[in-house]
Image (spheres, helix red, strand yellow):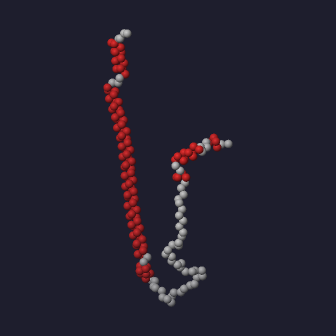
């Protein structure tokens, strides 16, 4: 047995030194990984901020449209109230008098019989009685079938390919 320690150890240390990385390379790798993670986090944060800003903008627009809708409903209610006031009996009577009309006397009123006219229909406050038929809602099988049943059905009946459908 022969042991040559001096030369062999030098060769091993040279090989180890050749394959080991320099400290500055290790530091660059750590810095690169850190910067990569930092860039990914910044990108995710920018996407989050962008989505949040859009949601906030749309929320403000919805609030503005709701306020505008309330204003329009208020204006419609005011206009309906004005129309009701203009169509009141006292206002219409005053306008008719201003235009030169006067109330008719009983001697000036003449009635004409119209054949086929039965008069005003009787006022019915209550709706006609109807029988209520209670039926359960009909659901498509796609909404009542579990995924296990669907998978079993698909495996038992495979879909036809284009080649199978041609004669």
Q: In this image, 147 relative to 82: left or right?
A: right
**Which quarter of the figure has residue 34?**
top left
Where in the figure is residue 131, as x and y percent of width and height?
54, 69
Rendered residue at 56%/45% (across/down):
152
Instruction: In the rendered view, tell whether residue 4 sits above or below residue 18.
Output: above
- Which residue sits at x=54%, y=65%? 133
Q: In the picture shown, does residue 7 fall above or below 106?
A: above
Query: For this rendering, which residue is in front, 27 or 2?
Result: 2
Q: Is residue 77 visible?
A: yes
Task: Give x and y (percent) for residue 85.
Answer: 41, 75
Q: Residue, x 32% and y 26% (percent of image)? A: 24
- Residue reaching furthest front? 1
Q: Visible in this render: residue 95?
A: no
Identify the residue at horizontal 61%, vertical 43% (top origin): 160
Q: Nearer the viewer, residue 42 or 85?
A: 42
Q: Is residue 113 shown left or right of residue 88?
A: right
């Amino acid at each position: 047995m022969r042991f040559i320690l001096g030369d062999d150890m030098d060769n091993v240390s040279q090989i180890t030194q050749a394959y080991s990385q320099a400290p500055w390379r290790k530091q660059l790798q750590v810095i690169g990984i850190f910067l990569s993670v930092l860039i990914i986090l910044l990108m995710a944060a920018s996407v989050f901020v962008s989505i949040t800003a859009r949601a906030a903008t749309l929320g403000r627009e919805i609030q503005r449209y709701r306020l505008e809708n309330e204003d329009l409903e208020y204006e419609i209610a005011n206009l309906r109230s004005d129309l009701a006031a203009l169509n009141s009996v006292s206002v219409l009577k005053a306008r008719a008098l201003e235009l030169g009309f006067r109330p008719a006397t009983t001697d000036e009123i003449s009635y004409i019989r119209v054949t086929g006219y039965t008069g005003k229909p009787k006022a019915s406050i209550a709706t006609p009685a109807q029988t209520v038929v209670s039926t359960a809602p009909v659901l498509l099988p796609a909404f009542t079938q579990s995924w296990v049943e669907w998978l079993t059905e698909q495996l038992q009946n495979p879909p036809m390919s284009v080649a199978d459908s041609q004669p």
